[in-house]
Image: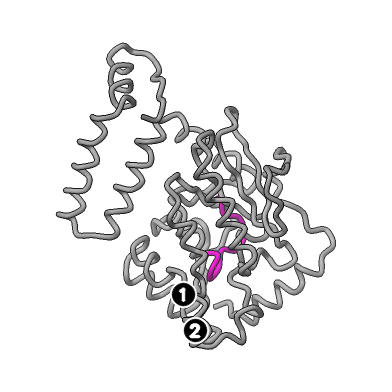
């Protein structure tokens, strides 16, 4: 088992390197300002139709540790993309070494129970879970603790073949606090979730795929390219119906089967009040591509 101490030693060696670069598979992406100026993330719009919002965590010396400032920026970027009618899908990624190696332990070290309650510690995470548009996590390297929880906040996880997932909070005397004990069992089942949370062990990308935590695994250099392809594919569908579909799938994790089926049927009926449903079925019958307008 890799302990937090041993991982810290590895991280220490990595952060001494002066050759830290972005992931190899982001070399074809040129980042530019989209209005807001960020210190801890990079934001761009990518894809052939420029309808995919790309957010890259950008604290390389800290292996993208999730400090509060980073999460405030991440939440703002997600909300901005969610409100932008030109954006169909959002991607969150890191770099080749780390998606996010966890929360910023130095930042929370002196927190108390009282200060956590009064400040609503970690409340910024709700900006991600409240997003109406699909979010895809493209995970290379370490996704540990808060990094694993951030990936699970997303709707789909694609991973590079060297990715590692884990909830090692047990090693530092605490437990996951941003969904690790709640979302992980829904992904992988109770037994596997217990093993991961109680041991602090890491899971590699291929094992994560077998468990259902990860949708697909790709070579490191192909990860972002394949993630953008998926985002573009999602972007060919009705934005309104995509949102309804996302809500319906999420409902399966938050209610009973009977209630979920009623919710699904209600949403299904509701699509028949939209022009996009009419256009989609008409295009299918006429054997042509649909022209969705989000209404």
Residue located 53% across and 68% down the image: 146
Q: Is residue 10 magenta?
A: no
Mark number, residue 174: 2
Mark number, residue 177: 1
Q: Label 2 near label 1: C-beta < 8 Å?
A: yes
Q: Tell me residue 18's x, y (percent).
A: 85, 62
Q: From mark 1 to mark 2, how far is it between C-alphas?
A: 9 Å
Residue 97 horizontal side relative to residue 239, left or right: right
Q: Secondary structure at mark 1?
A: loop
Q: Tell me residue 150's x, y (percent).
A: 51, 61
Mark number, residue 215: none
Q: Which residues are magenta?
A: 138-147
Determine crowd level at label 1: few under 14, some 14-19, many 20+ residues with C-alpha closer than 10 A.
some
Q: Is residue 143 magenta?
A: yes
The quarter of the displayed image where residue 269 is located: top left
Q: Residue furthest right?
A: 18
Residue located 60% across and 28% down the image: 48
Residue located 72% across and 58% down the image: 39
Quarter in which the N terminus is drawn? bottom right
The quarter of the displayed image where residue 284 is located: top left
Q: Tell me residue 235's x, y (percent).
A: 47, 33
Q: Tell me residue 112's x, y (percent).
A: 54, 88
Q: Secondary structure at mark 2?
A: loop
Q: Nearer the viewer, mark 1 or mark 2?
A: 1
Q: Nearer the viewer, residue 92 or 195?
A: 92
């Amino acid at each position: 088992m890799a302990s937090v101490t041993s991982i810290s030693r590895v991280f220490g060696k990595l952060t001494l390197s002066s050759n830290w670069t972005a992931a190899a598979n982001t070399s074809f992406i040129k980042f530019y300002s989209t209005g807001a100026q960020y210190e801890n993330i990079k934001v761009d719009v990518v894809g052939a139709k420029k309808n995919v919002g790309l957010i890259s965590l950008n604290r390389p010396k800290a292996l993208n540790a999730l400090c509060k400032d980073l999460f405030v920026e991440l939440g703002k970027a997600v909300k901005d993309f969610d409100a932008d009618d030109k954006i169909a899908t959002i991607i969150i990624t890191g770099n080749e070494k780390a998606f996010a190696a966890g929360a910023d332990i130095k930042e929370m070290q002196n927190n108390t129970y009282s200060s956590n309650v009064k400040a609503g510690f970690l409340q910024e995470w709700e900006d991600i879970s409240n997003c109406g548009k699909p979010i895809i996590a493209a995970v290379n390297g370490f996704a540990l603790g808060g990094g694993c929880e951030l990936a699970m906040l997303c709707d789909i996880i694609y991973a590079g073949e060297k990715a590692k997932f884990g909830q090692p909070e047990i090693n530092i005397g605490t437990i996951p606090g941003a969904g690790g004990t709640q979302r992980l069992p829904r992904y992988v089942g109770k037994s596997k979730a217990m093993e991961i949370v109680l041991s602090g062990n890491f899971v590699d990308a291929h094992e994560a795929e077998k468990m259902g935590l990860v949708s697909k695994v790709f070579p490191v250099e192909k990860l972002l390219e394949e993630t953008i392809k998926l985002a573009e594919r999602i972007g060919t569908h009705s934005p309104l119906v995509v949102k309804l579909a996302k809500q319906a799938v999420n409902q399966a994790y938050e209610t009973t089967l009977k209630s979920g089926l009623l919710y699904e049927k209600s949403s299904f009926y509701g699509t028949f009040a939209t022009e996009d449903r009419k256009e989609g079925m008409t295009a299918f019958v006429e054997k042509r591509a649909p022209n969705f307008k989000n209404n």
